[in-house]
Image: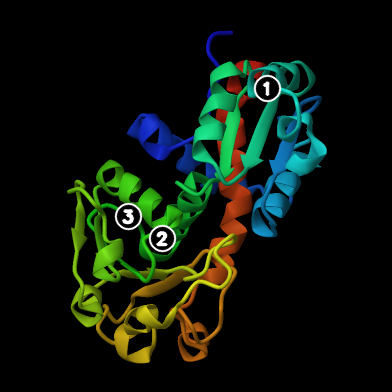
Amino acid sequence: MGAPRHFLDLNDIPGDTLKGILKNAHALKKQKFSPPQIFAGLSLAMIFDKRSTRTRMSFEVAMKQLGGHTLVMNAEEMQITGAESIEDTSKVLSRFVDAAMFRISSHERLLEIAKYASVPIINGLTDHSHPCQIMADLMTIEEKLGGVTGKKIAWFGDYNNVARTFAQAAPIWDFQLIVSCPEDLKPKTALKNVTYIKDAKEAAKDADVVVTDTWVSMGQEGKAIDKFFPWQVNTALMKQAKPNAIFMHCMPIHHNEEVTDEVLATPASVIYDEAENRLHAQKAILAWCLENSGVKV
């Protein structure tokens, strides 16, 4: 069967493969009400050390709609947080299920799990990156704007795991990512297709897509947010973007912090389409990961 097809970071996977996964996501969305049973007899383990709404629901529904089974466990329920080594946990897990999705803080731990696994491991979110989210975001941009290549995507607020994954995607899909955030949080090294612009209005000028995320991620409760308000997405900022620009946010939203309710109430906001596309992108990611198990992509 060869090495398992892990889905850990976008820049680990050939660009043509990623684009093929997105093409399949669009096709599977068209079959939303008559889903093909391509995962019949297959099982997905979902392991969490963080709260989850969209990740859990999208993966669980994706697997079940396509005929598979799911097993959900909190990391605290597993021996991985006790005496058992990551190697032993990973090897045992591989004997029980056909793939595993982890939503955990430590990216290094995820990489170690994947190192020892003989089944696909999927990054449902780590503190470093969030590839499944960006696949859904790119799918949404393709739906709303007809494509991603050549577009200007402007990111505001905290340079976090979601922003870093947009940066991974930028050279693959050949779009321009503008990062606008406090100077002490900007990317530490030069990145292809990524530009840092401190001034928010300048960064938003002629943008096709305006994106932000919460300023306080899980595990950062109590973090000071006052310094982020110059990068709030509000009506004045959206006016700098193109007239047909869309607004995106991976949710959950802290209303009137990183984005105002006025922006959320406009037709530019596509946050619920974006959330739904997690389901369809996840289906396509799972199909690619499980192709060696006989799944037809």
Q: Quadrant of residue 226?
A: bottom left
Q: Which residue is mark 3?
A: 148
Q: Which of label 2 and label 1 is nearer to you?
A: 1
Q: Quadrant of the N terminus?
A: top right
Give whichever of discs 3 and 1 has the lower sequence position.
1
Q: Is residue 8 left or right of residue 179?
A: right
- Callout 2: few (<14), some (14-19), or many (20+) C-alpha neighbours within 10 Å? many
Q: Amino acid at mark 3?
A: Val
Residue at left offset 75%, top offset 48%: 61
Image location of residue 113, percent across then percent down: 59, 26
Q: Which residue is mark 2?
A: 141
Residue at left offset 25%, top offset 76%: 204
Residue 44 in view here: yes
Give whichever of discs 3 and 2 has the lower sequence position.
2
Q: Which residue is mark 1?
A: 85
Q: Amino acid at mark 2?
A: Ile
Q: Secondary structure at mark 2?
A: helix
Image location of residue 139, percent across then percent down: 46, 53
Q: Nearer the viewer, residue 247 or 180?
A: 180
Is residue 144 placed above or below 131 in the rendered structure? Answer: below
Q: Mark 3 to mark 2: distance in Å?
A: 6 Å
Q: Mark 2 to mark 1: distance in Å?
A: 41 Å
Q: What's the mark number on residue 280? A: none
Q: Mark 3 to mark 1: distance in Å?
A: 42 Å
Q: Is residue 96 left or right of residue 223?
A: right
Give whichever of discs 2 and 1 has the lower sequence position.
1
Image location of residue 24, percent across then percent down: 52, 39
